[in-house]
Amino acid sequence: MTAFGATLDVTVNGINLMSAYSTVEDGAPFQIAGTTSALYTNTVANQLFAGAFEMDSDKIVLGASTDLLGGSISAAYAMTDSDIAGDTNEFDLVYSTNVTDAMALTAAYVYLDADAAADKAD
């Protein structure tokens, strides 16, 4: 597998802005999937589908996050051009907060439009 990832992050007036790019060639999906990725372009769909959209692909992610209502809210748009799954567009909106020291709450809306899928999913 050959892979490369880069990210550029900046904070402006309490809003964290990020952009990331990754490219993968001859990759197996479980080599780069999970809750975090060394490629910086991990999204909610990657966590649900174990990296299926990162095989033999180029991916761009643009996002923003900020602290809000005692937690964190983030939004991200990802575009993937994959030899296997075709073009994929994803929009994630996630809110997370700690309810107690031992319990966290996360709510997420994910819109995924993949050429390989028969219908859009959200």
Image (spheres, helix red, strand yellow):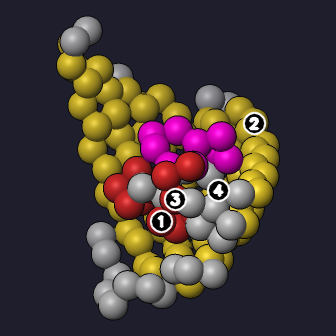
Tell me if 50 is positioned left or right of 121 in this view: right
User: Which residue in the protein does label 1 denote?
Assistant: 52
Q: Position of residue 15 (x, y in %)?
A: 61, 36
User: Which residue in the protein does label 4 denote?
Assistant: 62
Q: Amino acid at mark 3?
A: Pro
Question: Which residues, given as a range, are shown in magenta?
Answer: 32-40
Q: Give the number of the mark in front: 4 or 3.
A: 3
Instruction: Tell me the distance, in whole angstroms, between the alpha carbons under discs 4 and 3.
Output: 22 Å
Quick check: marks 4 and 3 in contact, CB under 8 Å? no
Q: Amino acid at mark 2?
A: Val
- Give the mark nearest the N terminus, 3 or 1: 3
> Which residue: 61% across, 71% down?
80
Task: Tell me where residue 100 sits by quadrant.
Answer: top left
Q: Give the number of the mark in front: 2 or 1.
A: 1
Q: Give the number of the mark in front: 2 or 3.
A: 3
Task: Tell me where residue 92 sits by quadrant.
Answer: bottom left
Residue 34 in view:
yes
User: Which residue in the protein does label 3 denote?
Assistant: 29
Quadrant location of the C terminus?
A: bottom left
User: Which residue in the protein does label 2 denote?
Assistant: 10
Instruction: Tell me the distance, in whole angstroms, between the alpha carbons under discs 2 and 3.
Output: 29 Å
**Magenta residues: mostly which secondary structure?**
loop
Mark 1 burial class by Cα count in 10 Å: few <14, some 14-19, many 20+ = many
Residue 60 in view:
no
> Which residue: 64% across, 56% down?
62
Mark 3 burial class by Cα count in 10 Å: few <14, some 14-19, many 20+ = some
Q: Amino acid at mark 1?
A: Ala
Quick check: marks 3 and 1 in contact, CB under 8 Å? yes
- Give the mark nearest the N terminus, 4 or 3: 3
